[in-house]
Every structure is written in C-alpha cells, then in structure tokens.
C-alpha cells in the first residue's frame, strides 16, 4: 500500500497527468503524519492543489503535522475560502493565522467572520473586477495577467467609480464579443443578480439554479462586492448539508468527518445520545401496555397485532416526516403552510389507514376461514378492531410526522432532527393507546 501511495504522489509530482482526485484519495488512506511527509516533498503549488480539494477531509490534521512556516506557506497558496475552512478545523488555527502574511490573514479572517452555512462563509474573495469603460480586449488581457491569482474566472464584475457592482459579464459573452470594438458595458448583464453575505446556503443554491449562474456575487449593504460564491462551492456545501440531514434523520448526531475517518470514541458519542433518548422514550411503550394489562390478559389475541399496529403507524409517520423535511429544505413549504399540510395529510392518512385496515382484516378472515389460525368465535370483531385501529394509528402517524418538522422549525431547531426513529417512537406510544381504546369500544361485552 505504501509503495502504491508513494508512486501516486511521485506521479503527481512528476506531472504525469495523474488526476488530483486520485492523489487525494491515496493520501486519505494514510495517517496524517505520513500524509504530511508526502505533502512536504511536493512543490508548494502542487501541494496546495491537493489541500484545496474538499474531499481531503483531514487536511487540517495534515497541516498540524507540518512545521508552522511550511503550513503557512501552503495555506497562502490555497484558495482563500478553502483555507478558511481548513483553519477553522485546525486545533491551533489562531497560531497558523498569525504566521500568515497580513494580506492573506485579513482575507481569511473576513471569511471566518461569517457562518459556514452562509454566502459569506462559502464565498471566495478571489474574483476578477474591472472598471466600466474598458474594451473587451483590455478585459481579456487583464484576465490573462491575474488568472493565476484567482480561484476561478467564471465571470467578471463591472464596478462604477465608487467601487459598487453595477453589472456582471460571463466569460462566454466576453469571448464571443469583438475584442477590439466592443465595450465591456455593452456586453454586460444589467442588473446583476447578487446576494447578501448572511444569506443561507439553500437560498444561494436556489438563486444559482434559478438564474443558471456559475458564480454569484456577494455584496455588502452599499453594493460593494465582497466575493463570489461559485457553483462548485455550492455543490460541496449542499452535499455536506444533505449528508448531515440524512445522518440526523437516521437518529445519529451529524458526523464531523467521513465514516472511516471517525474515531471509535467519536462514533460512540455521536450515536449513544440519540439511542439513549429513544430507549427512554420506548419505555413509555411498556407503561402504556401496563396500563392495559387487564385487557391483554382477557384478550391475548390482541397482542398478536401489536407489532403490526406499531410498525404501520411508525412507517406512516416516517413517510410524512421525510416528505415535509425535504419540502422545507427545498423551499417548497414555509412555516405558515402547516395548516395546508395538515388538511392534506388528514385525508391521506385516513385513506392509507383504510387500505391497510382492509388488508389486515382480509388477512384475519383468510387465516380463520382457511384454518391457519383460530382467532375465536368473535374473530369478526377482532378483524374490525385491527382495521379501525390501523385507520386511527396511520392517520395519527401521518399528522404527527408532518407536523413535527414544523414544530421543530418554529422552536428554532433543525427540522431534520425529526428523525425516523424519533417519529416511530412517538407513534408507537400513542398507537398503543389508540389501539386498545378502540378495542375497548368494539370488544366491550365480548372479549373485554
């Protein structure tokens, strides 16, 4: 393995055309100290290209293994937005910041001032801006001069005399224009689509999607550009956000690193909390069954359908929760739409419950008539209890599962915290109460 990794890094060093992503994948298989040794042997530009990759998940640990002056040299060569993310995760990030030159340190500190999930936290300060009045050919010549110091050149920002953003020019329109006769103002797009630095990343992604942009300028209250959010940065941020939501929805605290890079103790901490909460919540199920202990003793046949009842309600609730969480994340629903969702889920739950109820009652009737199992002389009432119980529990599960994300968002929590196990536990407890309450009504005077 070490020989293979050494060969991969050597190939990258020799510029044999080996993709950077393959080199990063090889370095990720190493412990940070070994990866640092191999990074240290590369030229600064090539080492920075590796560290710039978001999938290089333990870049902060690798930098921590390098001498401070070497680490500062690499951070200076990295893209400012990526460097800010790495420094934020580095244990001695403050010390590394102090070792940087004033210009680089100022740019990174400006990015660190914004939340990581905002436009300011995602933007890069490396963009191309020119004053109005220039010719297209002059702008292209300027791009050639500064290209190496810019992370990407998707578009050019056009500024007025006060330094405010007045228009943007895509690289495509710039190349298509006559470089000698066309003025930059004539091919610019007015007015530009911009975003404030505190804007949430989902809103940034929606703007980029709606306007089909490769870069979105970030401006302050006065209209002065602070940076740009590129489409690749948005994709990386959304992948991270969706991964975090998926983990939360599975009843796990979001992992800070990829699965295989997460230590044993860290994994225990991430999973033990939710498991303990869910275990304590499931104890309420035992309390509910104890409350109906007498009914269970008199109608043992009812216990046969408890797993069926509980799972159906939990599944219905999980379905509704997953749909609402996704709709909220995509901006398809707002907090004020809760009543519309409730009115939609009520008939949906009743219909789904009726379908499952018919299937459940049909199964009991088939088993009784075919002689597979004897549910007693009152088997028709048992079938009716199961059918009506499924209608009630599936309806409750749909309503509870759809309303829980709204409640969490209203309280200021992430709706993704409404994990499937949590919804299932909630419906399990209430489902037992609904099931036995319906049984008391239907079977009273017969089995109960």
Image (cartoon, grey):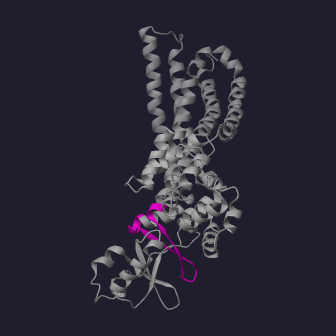
Percent position of residue 342, x then y = 53, 49
Does 62 appear above or below 375?
Answer: below
Percent position of residue 211, x then y = 39, 69
- Tell me the magenta residue range: 209-233
Residue 258 part of the magenta segment: no
Does 50 appear above or below 161?
Answer: above
Viewport quadrant of the C terminus: top right
Percent position of residue 10, x then y = 45, 50
| Residue 344 in sight in this render | no
Q: Tell which residue pokes out farthest to the top in this image.
A: 371
Quick one: 384 or 239, which is closer to the camera? 239
Does 23 appear above or below 52?
Answer: above
| Residue 162 in sight in this render | yes
Quadrant housing residue 93? bottom right
Does 424 appear above or below 89?
Answer: above
Residue 211 part of the magenta segment: yes
Percent position of residue 27, x then y = 52, 47
Residue at image x 38%, y 89%? 134
Horizontal arrangement in the rendering, residue 115 relative to residue 25 (left or right): right
């Amino acid at each position: 393995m070490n020989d293979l990794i050494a060969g991969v890094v050597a190939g990258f060093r020799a510029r044999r055309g080996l993709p950077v992503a393959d080199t990063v994948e090889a370095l990720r298989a190493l412990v940070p100290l070994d990866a640092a040794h191999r990074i240290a042997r590369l030229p600064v530009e090539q080492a920075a290209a590796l560290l710039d990759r978001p999938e290089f998940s333990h870049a902060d640990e690798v930098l921590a293994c390098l001498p401070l002056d070497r680490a500062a040299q690499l951070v200076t060569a990295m893209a400012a937005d990526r460097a800010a993310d790495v420094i934020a995760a580095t244990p001695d990030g403050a010390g590394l910041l102090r070792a940087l030159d004033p210009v680089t340190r100022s740019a990174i500190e400006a990015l660190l001032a914004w939340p990581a999930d905002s436009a300011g936290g995602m933007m890069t300060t490396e963009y191309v801006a020119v004053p109005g009045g220039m010719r297209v050919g002059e702008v292209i010549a300027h791009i050639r001069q500064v290209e190496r110091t810019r992370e990407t050149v998707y578009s050019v920002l056009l500024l007025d005399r006060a330094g405010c953003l007045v228009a943007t020019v895509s690289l495509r329109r710039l190349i298509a224009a006559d470089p000698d006769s066309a003025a930059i103002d004539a091919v610019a797009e007015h007015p530009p689509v911009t975003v404030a630095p505190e804007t949430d990343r989902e809103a940034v992604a929606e703007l980029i999607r709606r306007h089909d942009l490769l870069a979105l300028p970030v401006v302050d209250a006065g209209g002065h550009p602070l940076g740009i959010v590129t489409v690749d940065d948005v994709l990386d941020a959304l992948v991270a956000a969706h991964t975090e939501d998926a983990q939360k929805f599975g009843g796990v605290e979001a992992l800070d690193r990829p699965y295989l890079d997460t230590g044993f103790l860290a994994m225990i901490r991430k999973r033990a909390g939710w498991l303990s909460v869910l275990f304590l919540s499931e104890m309420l199920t035992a309390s509910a069954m104890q409350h109906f202990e007498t009914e269970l003793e008199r109608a043992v046949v009812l216990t046969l359908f408890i797993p069926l009842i509980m799972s159906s309600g939990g599944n219905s609730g999980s379905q509704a929760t997953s749909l609402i969480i996704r709709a909220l994340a995509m901006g398809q629903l707002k907090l004020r739409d809760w009543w519309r969702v409730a009115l939609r889920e009520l008939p949906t739950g009743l219909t789904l419950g009726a379908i499952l109820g018919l299937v459940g009652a049909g199964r009991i009737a088939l088993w009784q008539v075919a002689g597979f199992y004897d549910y007693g002389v009152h088997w028709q009432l048992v079938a009716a209890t199961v059918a009506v119980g499924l209608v009630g529990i599936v309806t409750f599960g749909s309503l509870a599962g759809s309303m829980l994300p709204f409640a969490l968002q209203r309280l200021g929590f992430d709706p993704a915290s409404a994990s499937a196990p949590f919804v299932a536990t909630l419906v399990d407890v209430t489902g037992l109460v609904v099931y036995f309450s319906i049984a008391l009504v239907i079977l009273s005077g017969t089995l109960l």
